[in-house]
Image (cartoon, rainbow, N blue to C red):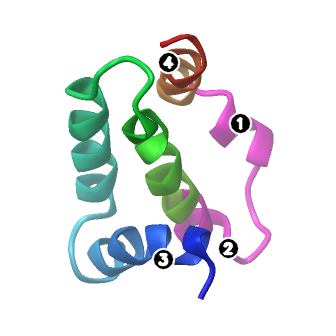
């Protein structure tokens, strides 16, 4: 199993059994406590990918609208700049 798939497993489990927002909230909390340069800063993107797949997995909906939200942009800037 590729590393990327293993990283998504916890978010897929949480999304299937609990609120999908819980996985995003948890990943954002972890990233907010991560030091600069930490690989944990990209953790919210794994949660966003899992959330996007749950919401738009059937090809419906706008990818651009989802990926250009303020919350995604914030985490993109932080992961890039810190």
Q: Name the mark nearer the viewer: 3 or 1.
A: 3
Q: Where is residue 62 in the image (x, y as percent from the top left)?
A: 77, 48
Please say if 47 is above or below 67.
below
Q: Name the mark nearer the viewer: 3 or 2.
A: 3
Pick the front one: 18 or 33: 33
Query: On residue 65, which mark appears?
Result: 1
Determine the residue located farthest toward the bottom in the rendered image.
Answer: 1
Cα gap from disc 3 to disc 2, whole angstroms: 19 Å
Sequence-earlier tag: 1 or 4: 1
Pick the front one: 32 or 23: 32
Query: On residue 6, which mark appears?
Result: 3
Crowd class of label 1 (few under 14; some 14 to 19; many from 20; radius 10 Å): few
- The residue beneath circle 2 is 57
Q: Name the mark nearer the viewer: 1 or 4.
A: 4
Pick the front one: 30 or 23: 30
At horizontal 21% and vertical 73% (from top left) the residue drawn is 18
Q: Decide: marks 4, 2 in contact (CB < 8 A)?
A: no
Q: What stretch is highlighted in magenta?
A: 52-69
Q: Decide: marks 3, 1 in contact (CB < 8 A)?
A: no
Say what secondary structure mark 1 lies in: helix
């Amino acid at each position: 199993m590729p590393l990327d798939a293993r990283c998504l497993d916890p978010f897929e489990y949480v999304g299937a059994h609990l609120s999908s927002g819980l996985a995003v909230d948890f990943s954002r909390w972890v990233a907010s406590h991560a030091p600069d340069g930490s690989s944990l800063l990209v953790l919210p993107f794994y949660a966003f990918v899992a959330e996007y797949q749950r919401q738009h997995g059937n090809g419906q909906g706008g990818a651009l609208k989802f990926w250009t939200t303020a919350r995604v942009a914030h985490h993109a800037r932080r992961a890039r700049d810190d």
